[in-house]
Amino acid sequence: MMKFFLSAILLLAQLPVWSFVPAFVQPAQQENKEKVVEKPASENAPEKSAQGEKAKPFAPKLSQPLPFKIGETLLYDVRFERLIFSGSIGDMKFSVSQPTATPAPLLWLKVELISKGFFPALFGIKVHNQFSALVSAADFGLINSTTRRQEGKVNTEEKNYVLRDEGRVTYIRRDLANPSVPARVLETACPYWVQDIISAIYFLRTQELKEGAVIALPITDYGQNYTVEAVIGKREEVKVDAGKFTTIKVETKAFGGKLIKKSGELFLWFSDDARRLPVKARIKLSGTTLNIELKKMLSGGL
């Protein structure tokens, strides 16, 4: 629960912005090749090149069977606290599906965030953001990801296409509210095995999560690469609308220059069972606390 969280989170610290703005991101110390296209770029991912003779680079081991099933749908309530203000401000939905007619088994990981409650009424901003990641079912390596933001007058689409065998990623951003504006395209090198923030959450669910362990998560977004560490903590009892869970607390080192310049905290709680359900997330940033709590599990989540 990070990117969608960050899309709901970082904004709350600077009301009324409802998006994870690239300005929050610490620029990577690398050279990116940037080009501007005058016509909308193709919706299809760039064609893959022929595979080289080298052995494929290492990819982490996954627990099998995967802890989530096709059709799993998880519903969350998003609440925030800031000074005298507090309340429910959004609904979030996670889902897992499988595309058909693909040469290799793939998984679609999707998140939807919709504003509700007093926030849109108070600030006059309605939010409907959608995030998706397509990953290999074999090793969970990222194939492509899409972010669609509808936040008031903002209407943008961002895509990442990962060419794993070539070791590069193409990032494309379009302003759908201003179709005459050329798309922004960034191309850069990236690891063979990489994640976006959505797939990283699901990947953590496939890991053993031993107390004291540190899991390095290579992330690509905005045409840049980052490594975010997940530090596995102690077991804790957590009660949410979906029930009472024994959980594993995980601190995600996303703030303070790793992925986000600002200082803050991001904790995740996964159920301490075979499902590794993301039960809760808490983010603290600039005097704002955001809590995302599991309220319901639908088909595939039981």
Image (cartoon, rainbow, N blue to C red):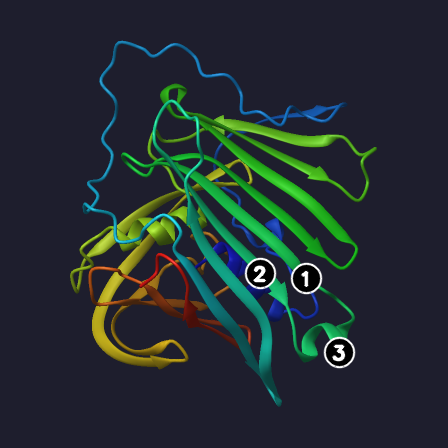
270 on left or right of 226: left
Q: Earlier in the sequence, mark 2 or mark 1?
A: 2
The reply to whether the C-beta atoms of the residues labelled 2 and 1 are less than 8 Å apart is yes
The residue positioned 57% from the left and 64% from the top of the image is: 8
Q: Give the answer, above or below, for where 7 lies relative to 39.
A: below
Q: Amino acid at mark 1?
A: Val
Counting other residues with Cα less than 10 Å from the Cα at mark 3, is it few (<14), some (14-19), or many (20 or more)? few
Q: Identify which residue, 82 or 271, lies in the foreground.
A: 271
Q: Earlier in the sequence, mark 3 or mark 2?
A: 2
Question: What SS does tag 2 mark?
Answer: strand
User: Where residue 145 is drawn, which disc sits there?
Assistant: none
Task: Quickly name the residue at label 3.
Answer: 122
Q: Earlier in the sequence, mark 1 or mark 3?
A: 3
Q: In the image, residue 11 lies at what x, y percent?
A: 62, 65
User: Where residue 113 is drawn, which disc sits there?
Assistant: 2
In which quarter of the view is residue 179 placed? Answer: top right
Q: Amino acid at mark 3?
A: Leu
Question: What SS does tag 1 mark?
Answer: loop
Q: Farthest front residue?
A: 299
Q: Identify which residue, 64 or 285, lies in the foreground.
A: 64
Q: Tag count in the figure?
A: 3
Q: Identify which residue, 150 or 220, lies in the foreground.
A: 150
Task: Quickly name the residue at label 1.
Answer: 127
Nearer to us of marks 3 and 2 is: 2
Disc 2/disc 1 C-alpha distance (Å): 7 Å
Counting other residues with Cα less than 10 Å from the Cα at mark 1, is it few (<14), some (14-19), or many (20 or more)? many
Q: Give the answer, above or below, for where 218 lies relative to 55.
A: below
Q: Which quadrant, please, contains the N terminus?
A: bottom left
Q: Farthest bottom residue?
A: 84
